[in-house]
Amino acid sequence: MTMRTTPLDDFLWRATLGAGILGAAAGPLGSLVLWRRMAYLGESIGHIGLLGAGAGLLLGIDPLIGVTLLAILSALIMARARDGLIPVGTSIGVVGHVGLALGFVLLSSMETVRTDLIGYLFGDVLALSGIDVGEIAAICTVIAVLSAVFWRRWLMAAVNADIAKAEGRASPLAETVFLVLVAVLVALGLRVVGALLIVALIIIPPAAARPFARSPEQMAALAGLIGAASAPLGLALAYWKDIPAGPAIVLAAAALFGLSSLSARLAR
């Protein structure tokens, strides 16, 4: 007897695969973001991603292309903010929120997409197509390969930037690749959990993995597993409580973080 899948099964499988792959790829990069205290950078890139989506729609191209290009450009620009007189956190915050404001203005002026603002803010993972899942898988594979290549350099820079420079492990290329990959991850996350929640998917799984990790590599791997597990758990929660899927995935990750913290306290 053969099993027949329904359209409902199909889009749930696509949503689970797309969000799970993204969560797994976010684990190692999210760990580095957490160690380097760069969550504000990812948040600002996510805000600017909304402007990229609007620019893509205005130009008649795939919004993901606009999001990715503008996210990469903003990451590289904000990385230079540390060279200015204004504190880096202030500069990045200003750029990110200006981008968010411009994105709102641009999208609200387009009658055809005004009703879809909620999708850009909180994601629309249930609308992922098979092609979308394939794109996410391919891009996340590239992210994983490059992460393995540059991992030692990134880790040394996260632990002690001065030692990394002294040993020749710090390089502009490694830093640029890291920022570009974070930007690409944020751009992909816009479709899954939206501009306002993508940073949560990046930093919550590493925070949940930290109490059980005995090495940076263990933390990165556990963060990837927790990020991947958040997808089916969040979608199940969304189906059960009839709530938006993107926020539900973040809530599932937060619940795993809560269990992790409680387990660590009980163990001590």
Image: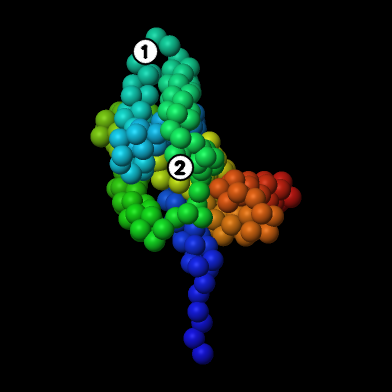
- Find residue 142 and report its horizontal and vertical position in percent: 31, 51
Residues at marks 2 and 1, CA–CA distance in whole angstroms: 29 Å
Q: Residue furthest top?
A: 85
- Find residue 160 and report its horizontal and vertical position in percent: 41, 31
Amino acid identity at mark 1: Gly
Q: Residue furthest bottom?
A: 1
Position of residue 229 in the picture relative to residue 57 (left or right): right
Q: Is residue 143 visible?
A: yes
Secondary element at image label 1: loop
Residue at 38% across / 55% down in the picture? 132
Residue at 35% across / 58% down in the picture? 131
Secondary element at image label 2: helix
What residue is pinned by disc 2?
190
Which numbered dot is residue 84? 1
Which numbered dot is residue 235? none
Q: Earlier in the sequence, mark 2 or mark 1?
A: 1
Give the foreground label among 2 and 1.
2
Amino acid identity at mark 2: Leu
Front position in the image: 154 or 251: 251
Residue at 51% across / 55% down in the picture? 126
Q: How is the image coloured?
A: rainbow
Front position in the image: 197 or 228: 197
